[in-house]
Amino acid sequence: MADDQDDKRLPKEAVYSVPVEISVVLGKAVLRVHQLLKLGRGAVVELEQKINEPVEVYANDVLIARGEVIITDGDKIGVTFTELVRSVAQKPRD
């Protein structure tokens, strides 16, 4: 019976090319609709996140890590992982 189940499993390599969307949350803010409607070019929305606090890294809307924002050699923004989140029962972000 175990051999039958093993035959039905895909090899790990079968999922290596599946795309995973990675997103990084710099912080969050709660605004009322009237505040949102007043926003225009140059407006600043203050986030709850402090400057030295880690950002959250999500894979397909599931928290996987926390890290620090960096500037890469190619003048792009990147994230250095400082903590991996390894929870089996993850809930998607709000």
Image (spheres, grey):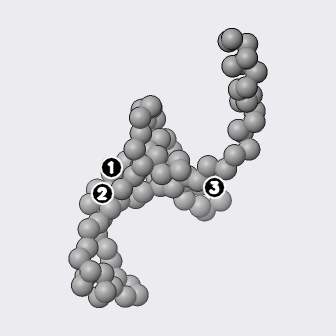
**Three-letter amino acid code of the residue under disc 2:** Gln
Residue 21 in the image: above or below residue 33: above
Residue 67 in the image: above or below residue 14: below
Q: Position of residue 75 (x, y in %)?
A: 60, 62
Q: Residue at x 59, y 61 (%)?
A: 76
Checking the image for residue 78, the label placed there is: none
User: What residue would you read off at disc 1?
Assistant: 53
**Three-letter amino acid code of the residue under disc 3:** Asp
Q: Residue at x 76, y 21 (%)?
A: 7
Q: Secondary structure at mark 3?
A: loop
Q: Secondary structure at mark 1?
A: loop
User: What residue would you read off at disc 2?
Assistant: 49
Compared across the picture, whether 50 is left or right of 17 comes to: left
Viewer-side residue, 70 vs 31: 31
Compared across the picture, whether 62 is left or right of 20 comes to: left
Q: Residue at x 69, y 46 (%)?
A: 18
User: What residue would you read off at disc 3?
Assistant: 73
